[in-house]
Amino acid sequence: MLLFSTELYAQRNKNIPLTKIYPDTSVKQIQKDTIIISKKGRPQTDLADIVGKLFNKKTISEEDSVVMKPEVSIVPAIGYTLVSRLAGVLSGNVAFRTGPQSRVSAIVASISYTQNKQFTVPLQTSIWTKNNTYNFIGDYRYYQYPQSTFGLGSNSTVNNKEPMDYSFIRFYETALGHVSGNFYAGIGYMLDSHFDITDKGNISGARSDYAAYGKSSHDIASGFTVSGQYDSRDNAINPAKGGYASIQYRSSVTVLGSTSNWHSLIIDMRKYFRFPENSDNVIALWSYNWVILSGSPSYLDLPSISWDANSATGRGYIQGRFRGAQMVYAEVEYRYRITANGLIGGVVFGNAESFSAQQGTRLQVIQPAIGPGLRIKLNKVSKTNITIDYGFGSQGSNGLFIGIGEAF
């Protein structure tokens, strides 16, 4: 099966299991963490069922097929985003439990090369200890990444385009401990290193915001984080009810190798509810706010659209289209079924973001985006969808966004 997944590495945050094929049998088994049943009790269908019917093979969804023995899956894939255009991806997933009652731990890695000559190797981990007392979350990346910037603040225009190229290394590790109920809290370490940074200057010939802010061929952000998290979602992959909230304070300091001292805060809040109440349709709300509290990060470490953990903000705009010292973001999405068996669904979404320019300046104009989307059920047990969205933003921005799993 061909999976559209330039964002497949985001499985770590979404706990998305891959389908494992056992080549010595005609039976396909599906890994999962929890079973989600249609509210109206209708028989559900996914792509595995369709493929099974075509080849006259049975499909089985076990009560819980992920055990302490690691389950390994490797899939080739293609994807498309505005920043990469077409991308070829080879992705792998290892799923396992550290104890009989533990949540599913996952190690997800991929390697990709894009039409824009970008080479990326992300590796993400989420390891749950026995009885879910601790959750160790890792995010490690190596990028060779040609990408344009468009200046600071949400008043920036496409005429400010400045082609850039750089290499990027990330090392994030966070340990969350159970506090009470759905609450977790913990500390971590974060390292971002951009090097071999080059730029071609503003295409208009004017002095760019990047030049005014301060160019650098190499910058490092190194420091500790303090995080708190609440999660009452019924399913982390494709929630129908519940909520999620997290807050993360980051302190990058020169004593740990940072180019400069600076401090930031990220507040991420989400809410889900059925509408109408007795249907399988869902309204999803998202607020994502990322601000620099003090200090001066390097240009590439500033808050920027689609540089959140899952690269999900700002459908309708290219990654990095808006950047600044403060980012305020909100999105609403309506998710609905098209076919009663759940195989095909649709969404309509709208988002809006506002950025300030440099530290100490005010938020600028609100930039909206809207769009429709199609959903194809990849795994009916985990509710994992192939997502195909088309977003329309301001100043003629528009583009196709393909991935696995919902944006939030």
Image: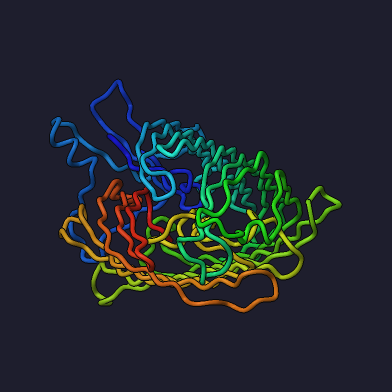
Farthest residue to the front: give it: 205
Q: Quadrant of the C terminus?
A: bottom left
Q: Residue at x 80, y 59 (%)?
A: 261
| Horizontal side of residue 229 vs 189, given as left or right | left
On the picture, is 279 further left or further right than 120? left
- Residue located 29% across and 53% down the image: 388
Residue 218's x, y, as percent?
Answer: 72, 44
Of residues 62 and 286, the one nearer the viewer is: 286
**How far from the left and from the top, in percent, is residue 107?**
53, 39
Q: Is residue 271 visible?
A: no
| Residue 394 lies in quadrant | bottom left
Q: Residue furthest right?
A: 255
- Residue 28 can be seen, yes or no: yes
* Residue 254, percent from left and from top: 83, 53
Q: Quadrant of the N terminus?
A: top left
- Which of 347/16 is in front? 347
Q: Position of residue 303 (x, y in %)?
A: 60, 62
Above or below 317: residue 283:
below
Residue located farthest toward the top when viewing the structure as drawn:
24
Q: Nearer the viewer, residue 119 or 280?
A: 119
* Residue in the image at 52% along x and 73% along y: 354
Instruction: State how many labels appear.
Output: 0
Against 403, residue 41 (above or below) is below
